Amino acid sequence: MSLRVAIVGSGPAGIYTAEALTKQAGEPVEIDVLDRLPTPYGLVRYGVAPDHTSIKSIAGYLRKVLELPSVRFLGGVELGSDVTVDDLAACYDAVVYCTGAMVDRHLGIAGEDLPGSVAATDFVNWYCGHPDVPPDAFSLDSAEVAVIGVGNVAVDVVRILAKTADELRSTDVPQEVLDRLAKSQVTTIHMIGRRGPEHAKFTLKELRELGELTNCDVLVRPDEAGSGELGELSRQIRGNVEVLRSWSSRTPSGRPRRLDVRFWLRPVEILGAGRVEALRLERTRLSEGRVVGTGEYETIPAGMVLRSVGYQSVPLPGVPFDTATMTVPNTAGRVGEGQYVAGWLKRGPTGVIGTNKSDAAETVRTLLADLAARPERPEPGARLEDVLAARGVRPVTYTNWLAIEAAEAALALSLGRGEHVKLVGRPAMLAAFTPATPEP
């Protein structure tokens, strides 16, 4: 009798979990990797910036796992609407939830709900072609944009705003999005951090990329770059501060766009009559390790405010959830009998893509130890495909996904653009493998 395991989520955490199961299980194993989207790879496809091709290449590694004989991809299957926790419990020996951190944190300030105030995750999903965000979601018709946050996601957003459409033409950005980027009216970008340069979360490699932009002057104010000794800082942070200080001596060279990297400022209100028009900021300082306001304010014009101040998971129907940590409570990945968790849903939005590999391995060790400790393991009483068929749900198979991928390659060839151009929306993806209905 084969061990049957369902994995909910086909991003890195989910696929690394499938790989760990194939390597650690001492018996035959059947693994179904479910995803609500018709495409696999999660944030590798819809979170990594399109011009970061070296990072996106990890999809090649994940592909090999999905092509293992013991692994099956079932896309377009959503927990809560298509299947329930009870359904999965009846069909599998164990279930592992790996749905990541899908929403952003809010600023909690007045005006945050104005049109033009949006999550950076929505903007990332837009330029990455996520089917939940239509290509007309952003028009980029404002001259000035404020990006709140100084992490790698904020840097990615800033870089896409600063680059020309021609610089992104060879990437997999959807053509509809590329057309809108080509019409962008953005000339000034403000990237704003509550603390100083030594507290910024971006990596040195990402930061240096901003300094290499050919279409954008990148500037830092000398009074915000800091002047203290760097000896006690880590190598990574010291590198960041040194780069930022070097930018503070720059003068604008007249490039089409300008990026002002700001520090020691926190948003206190988004202003506008009917939509975002400006952002009010308060100067900050550290007091006993905490950020406090100084009572000094400034207002910058902005037609769009993108918040990138952290991400969090959302509850899954029928799965325990801790609203304090925004994670599924677990012990080394164990949630309850037959239920497990891995990835950001398990530990919060920390680490890099590779961190999910060791995290998944820990969860799988827990899962296999639990199964080995059972005196008897009853055979699951149903097959998921039968449950789905009874409800009229037709999963997207791995073969279907390859057809979507082939259609994206053909689209790129027809447009004279790179290797792939993403299809926009579920209907276009499904049409890639669904035969057209003959004319009557």
Image (cartoon, grey):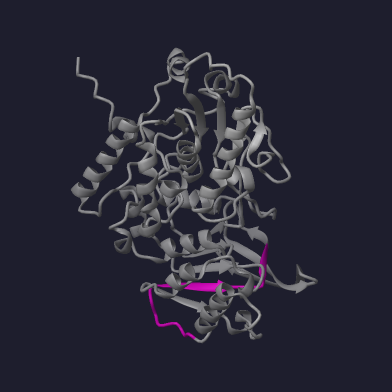
Q: Left or right: 382 with respect to 294? A: left
Residue 148's place in the image compared with 118, above or below, is below
**Callout count:** 0
Q: Is residue 24 something that shows in the picture?
A: yes
- Residue at the (47%, 29%) spot, across then down: 27
The magenta-colored residue range is: 250-267
Q: Toward the viewer: 411 or 282?
A: 411
Q: Is residue 103 left or right of residue 14?
A: right
Taking the spot 34% from the left edge, 32% from the top edge, the residue there is 398
Residue 439 rendering spot, x and y as whole percentages: 19, 18
**92 or 242, which is in the foreground?**
92
Q: Is residue 183 magenta?
A: no
Which residue, as the protein is rendered here, is positioned at the far right?
288
Residue 183 visible in image: no
> Quadrant where the C terminus lies?
top left
Measured from the top left, where is residue 276 in percent x and y? 57, 56
Which residue occupies the foreground of this view, 365 or 118?
A: 365
Dividing the picture into quarters, in which one does residue 103 lie? top right
Residue 28 percent coordinates (x, y) = 44, 28
Above or below — where is 264 with respect to 179?
below
Instruction: Give the residue drawn at x 43%, y 70%.
Output: 209
Point out residue 275 in the picture as x, y percentages from the top left corner: 57, 53
In this image, 225 relative to 53: left or right? right
Against 228, residue 417 (above or below) is above
Magenta-colored stretch includes residue 254: yes
